[in-house]
Image: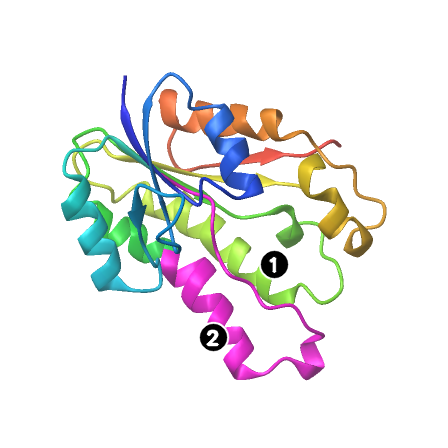
């Protein structure tokens, strides 16, 4: 049994991840103080360090959060870009950059991206760009991770459980069940792969 920090466990993607991590001790964290074991803001280095120090020993970090702003490229402001970059991109990079100081030997990080960097849709340029950046980060940083630490990203299409929210934005996409995405998280945490982008798509 591994001790896993799962960030965003109460969200749809977090629930999908949780479905694949049932045999482990899962410690939950999120921006809200309610409904989680610990509170964390991935855009804050101080908050991340506080989380890791308070948890103590852990074998894996699984992240399922990242704030993204949606707008037409010609109308998107720098502030909207920076909100997305500081959360979905730098937030996740810092989660690893700081976390590698605290995680157990041969631990693992699993980050979240999304299918829009390979199948773009209108208004999602910031989401697509930062997802692409994290997928590249994972592929490259795997060669530099110390102490046998692994890192992968999960790149899923829209979840069946979230189709009522995102379906209108994604005509022609086929949603996948959360339990299938959970299998990708399980493979990342329990397998031996590193530097991999695990795509979960219906076609």
State the quadrant of the C terminus. Answer: top right
Q: Which residues are magenta?
A: 62-91
Of all residues shown, which one is farthest toward the right? 172
104 magenta-colored: no
Left or right: 94 in relation to 85:
left
Say the numbered circle drawn on residue 14. none
Separation of disc 2 and disc 1 at Cα? Answer: 14 Å
Residue 46, quarter of the rendered image: bottom left
Q: Is residue 101 visible?
A: no
Residue for point 52% across, 34% down: 15
Asked whether 36 or 16 is in front, the reply is: 36
| Residue 143 placement (x, y as % from top left) | 30, 41
Looking at the rendered structure, the secondary structure element under dot 1 is helix
| Residue 71 placement (x, y as % from top left) | 68, 73
Q: Which residue is mark 2?
A: 82
Q: In this figure, which colouring scheme has been used for the structure?
A: rainbow
Left or right: 34 in relation to 132:
left
Nearer to us: label 2 or label 1:
2
Residue for point 84% across, 50% down: 171
| Residue 53 placement (x, y as % from top left) | 14, 47
Residue for point 38% across, 49% down: 34
70 magenta-colored: yes
Image: 39 above or below 9: below
User: Label 1 neighbourhood size at 10 Å, few (<14), some (14-19), many (20+)?
Assistant: many
Looking at the rendered structure, the secondary structure element under dot 2 is helix
Q: Is residue 35 visible?
A: yes
| Residue 4 placement (x, y as % from top left) | 31, 31
Say the numbered circle drawn on residue 128. 1
């Amino acid at each position: 049994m591994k001790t896993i920090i799962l960030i965003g466990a109460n969200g749809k993607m977090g629930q999908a991840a949780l479905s694949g991590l049932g045999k482990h001790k899962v410690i939950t964290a999120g921006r809200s103080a309610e409904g989680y074991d610990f509170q964390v803001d991935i855009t804050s280095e101080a908050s991340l360090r506080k989380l890791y120090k308070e948890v103590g020993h852990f074998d894996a970090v699984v992240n399922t959060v990242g704030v993204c702003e949606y707008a037409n490229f010609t109308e998107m402001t720098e502030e909207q870009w920076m909100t997305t970059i500081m959360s979905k991109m730098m937030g996740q990079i810092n989660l690893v950059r700081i976390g590698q100081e605290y995680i157990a030997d041969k631990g693992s990080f699993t980050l979240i991206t999304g299918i829009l960097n390979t199948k773009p849709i209108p208004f999602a340029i910031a989401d697509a760009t930062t997802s692409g950046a994290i997928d590249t980060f994972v592929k490259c940083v795997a060669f530099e991770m110390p102490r046998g630490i692994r890192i992968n990203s999960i790149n899923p299409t829209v979840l069946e459980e979230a189709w009522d929210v995102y379906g209108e934005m994604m005509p022609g996409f086929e949603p996948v069940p959360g339990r299938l995405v959970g299998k990708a998280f399980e493979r990342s945490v329990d397998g031996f792969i590193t530097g991999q982008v695990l795509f979960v798509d219906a076609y």
